[in-house]
Amino acid sequence: MRIIRLDTVDSTNKYALTHLDTLTDRAVIVAEEQTAGRGRLNRVWLSPRGENIYCSIVLKEQKSNPLLTVLAALAVARTVRGRGLAARLKWPNDVLVHEKKICGVLAESNAKGLVVGIGVNINMTAESLAALDRPATSLRAETGRIHDRGKFLRELLKKFFAFYEQARRAGFAKLAEIWQNELDLTGKRVKIQTVQQEFYGTVIQIDKEGALLVATAQGVEKVLAGDVHVV
Ligand code: BT5
């Protein structure tokens, strides 16, 4: 693992994707601030200077795997729990504390490899958090004190690569199982929003690939990407 530190960048994911040719497998891009941090579907990821973690992990793999997002979210959730907070995973890419978003993951790829982007709110202030259009939080907002970003990042990367090694050795199915248990969505009535459609159903389970299986009046829908809301 090699960490490349940037001061200001538009987006660590964009930087990593643009430089995939010269970046080595497992390189990690970390920035102090992002001027155009991105979420899914061209949403904005608020990335104020010096307050949070904005990083992108480079994996020189050909095949994208939705479970890499899970792997990152699990690593973040466990690192947050190590600070005494009850972090929960939300399908497909969020980590929540007290129902508020503390982390988002965005995995992207091109022909040269994959990039797993992770944003974790560490010392973001209540004022900055209030500017967001959805409930969000930070370690600081939850605990009332400043946290060491470097220490958090080291722990997070250690956990990420440990999960990654394990998944490469033993397969990703085990990860889907851990996720299924942590998500706590089974049997819940949900509203699913994808780029193409919006529908209601009851969650059956997460399958081996990390897709959400939802029972609807029309049959079972397999959802690989989208937003889920418990209703
Ligand atoms: C995500 O998208 O949650 C993926 C976020 C990934 C960010 C990392 S930072 C390093 C790397 N480089 C990048 O450019 N991106 C990655 P999504 O599920 O679409 O959620 C986006 C939504 O979260 C926004 O529309 C806001 O409502 C909310 N949001 C924006 N900034 C936030 C923040 N700092 N904390 C919590 N919520 C935020």
Image (cartoon, rainbow, N blue to C red):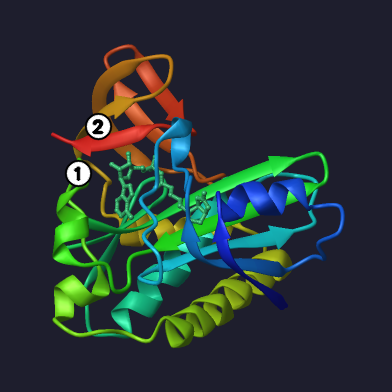
Residue pictured at 25% horizontal, 74% vertical: 139
| Residue 213 sits in quarter | top left
Q: Is residue 168 left or right of residue 218?
A: right
Q: Is mark 1 within 8 Å of ligand 1?
A: yes
| One can see residue 97 in this view | yes
Q: Is residue 92 left or right of residue 81?
A: right
Residue pictured at 32% horizontal, 72% vertical: 122
Identify residue type, mark 1.
Answer: Arg
Residue pictured at 41% horizontal, 38% vertical: 212
Measured from the top left, where is residue 195 in percent x and y?
43, 20
Q: Is residue 202 left or right of residue 14?
A: left
Q: Which mark is residue 64?
A: none
| One can see residue 98 in this view | no
Q: Is residue 112 left or right of residue 182?
A: right
| Residue 152 sits in quarter | bottom left
User: Can you identify the residue that label 2 sits on?
Assistant: 202
Element under disc 1 = loop
Measured from the top left, where is residue 64 in percent x and y?
68, 44
User: Can you identify the residue that label 1 sits on?
Assistant: 134
Nearest the viewer among 60 and 86 is 60
Nearest the viewer among 67 and 170 is 67
Look at the image and tell me in which quarter the C terminus lies.
top left
Q: Residue furthest top?
A: 218
Measured from the top left, where is residue 37 in percent x and y?
47, 48
Identify residue type, mark 2.
Answer: Thr
Element under disc 2 = strand
User: Considering only vertical position in the picture, is 33 above or below 1?
Assistant: above
